[in-house]
Amino acid sequence: MPEPSSPKTTALSSNNATDNTGAALTGELRRLLPTLRTIIGDDRPVLVGFDRGGWSPALFQHMSSAGFDVLTWRKGTTGDIDDSLFSEVTHTDEHGQTRTWAAADIRVEVPVGTTGEVLSMRQISRKVKVPAGGLRQIHILTTDTDLATGEAIYRMGARWRQENYFRYARIRFALDSHDAYTSTDDDPERSVPNPAKRKAYQNVLTAKTRYGKALADTDAALLAARTPAPGTATVLITNAGHNAITADLFTAQTVFEEAQAVHKEIPARVPLGDIAPGQQVLDTETKLLTHAIRMAAFNTASTLAREIRTNTGYARADDEAHALIRQALTTSGDIDPGRDGYLTIRLDPLPTKRATAAIAELCDHLTSTETRYPGTDRILRFETKKRETSLSD
C-alpha cells in the first residue's frame, strides 16, 4: 500500500494477468502507459513492480523513458556482491512494524537486447538462507533513485500480498463463481498462448533427455573400446566399429536438433479463433459488478483483521485475526437507533471469552473514529453485549 511520502505502487505479475490481458504483458503495458499517465496525472510518480516472469529490460527502458519507475527481481545468473558492501537497513511499514535486513545497494548496467545497449539501474542485494544450509544472494533492480533501500526490499516482498489477496478472496468470497449465464462472443483476434508451442517444447525436453543418455552411453562404450583387454598392449578400433558405437548418439542428436528447429518455428501466440473458434465469455458487466462487491467485502474483512493485530491485545492475532473477523461478521446482534445522534451496532458474545474481549477492544477502537453512517448525521457506535452466563475458553 502507498505511504503518504512514497510513490504509488502498481504490482503486476506475468502469471497474474487478468482476462483482458490478451497479448503479451510487455505489449499490453506499452499500450496502456499513456492511458495510465492520463489517469494519474503528469507529476505523480509511479512505481511498477514485476516478478521474474515479467522480466524485459527493453520494456523497463521504455517505461523509464516514459516517466515510470520499475521494481523487479533480477533474472538470470548474476555474480555475488562483495560482503564488505552489505550494511544493515530498516523499514517501518504503515502499521508501525519495523523490519531489518542486511543489504547492499549498488549501480549496475543491465544489457538491453543483443546490441550492446545497457540500462543503468540500482541493484539491491540481500542474503537469504537456502534449504540445504548456508546463504545465497538475491537481487532487486529498480530505476527509482529516491526509494529508500529498506522500502524497496519491503515493497518487493509485499508484491506477494497481491497474489495472496486474490488467492484468499477466491477461497472466502468466491471470486471465480458462476454469477450469470449471459454470454457473448469472445474476440477471435485476441492473442493467446499457442498450445502447440508447449507441446513442441515437451518434445524438445524429451529429445534432450534421450540425447544426454545416448551421450553418456557412447562415452562409456568408447572408453571400453579403447581399454586393452588384460594381457594385451594395444587395441584396434576400425571406422566401422566407431560408427557402430556412435550411431545411436548421432541419431539422438539429429532428433534433438530437429525438435529444437520445430519448436523455434512455431509462433508463441496465435489468434483465439485459430485454436478455439466460437469461444464464449460470460457477461462482463455482471461479472465486474459481483467482483466489485466481493472485493469490497474482502477489503473490509482484511482491514478489520489488520485492526485486530494493531489495536487489540489479542495474543494470537498474527495467526487468527482473519478467522476471528469472519466469526464476528457472521455472529448475530442488534442495530439500535434509539439514542439521538448515534447508531449502535451491538454484537452478541462470541463463543470464547478471549474472542469476545478482542472484538470488544476492536469495537472501542472503531467507535473512537466517530465515523458517520453514510447519508445521515448519526455516529456509528460498536459494542458487545454482556455475557449472561460464564462460558469456558
Image (cartoon, rainbow, N blue to C red):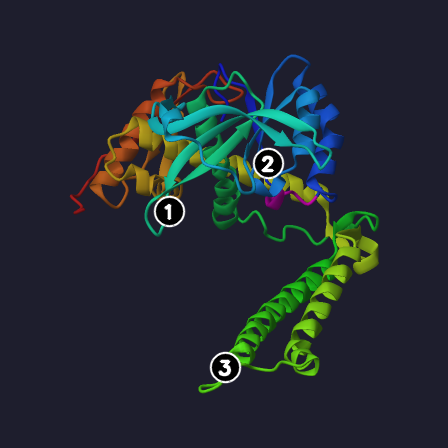
Which span is picked out in magenta?
14-19
| Furthest residue toward bottom | 231
Query: Is residue 88 rendered to the left or right of residue 65?
Result: left
389 relative to 40, above or below? below
The numbered dot on residue 130 is 1
Question: Which of label 2 and label 1 is nearer to you?
Answer: 1
**Disc nearer the start of the sequence (3/2):** 2
Residue at (57% x, 76% y) in the render = 222
Cβ–Cβ below 8 Å for labels 3 and 2? no
In three-dimensional space, the C-alpha distance between marks 3 and 2, rounded to whole angstroms, equals 68 Å
**Residue for badge 2:** 12
Q: Is residue 79 magenta?
A: no
Q: Quadrant of residue 25?
A: top right
Q: Nearer the viewer, mark 1 or mark 3?
A: 3
Q: Residues within 10 Å of mark 2 (few under 14, many from 20)?
A: some
Q: Nearer the viewer, residue 14 or 365?
A: 14
**Amino acid type at mark 3:** Ala
Q: Percent from the top left, x then y, of residue 198?
A: 69, 60
**Helix, strand or loop at disc 1?**
loop
Percent x, y of residue 325: 37, 39
The residue singled out by tag 3 in the image is 233
- In the orientation shown, which residue stands out farthest toward the top? 43
Q: Which mark is residue 73?
A: none
Q: Nearer the viewer, residue 344 or 264?
A: 264
Q: Residue at x 54, y 20 (%)?
A: 375
Q: Type of residue at label 1?
A: Val
- Residue 314 shows in the view: yes
- Specify whether residue 17 is painted magenta: yes
Q: Secondary structure at mark 3?
A: loop
Q: Residues within 10 Å of mark 1 (few under 14, many from 20)?
A: few
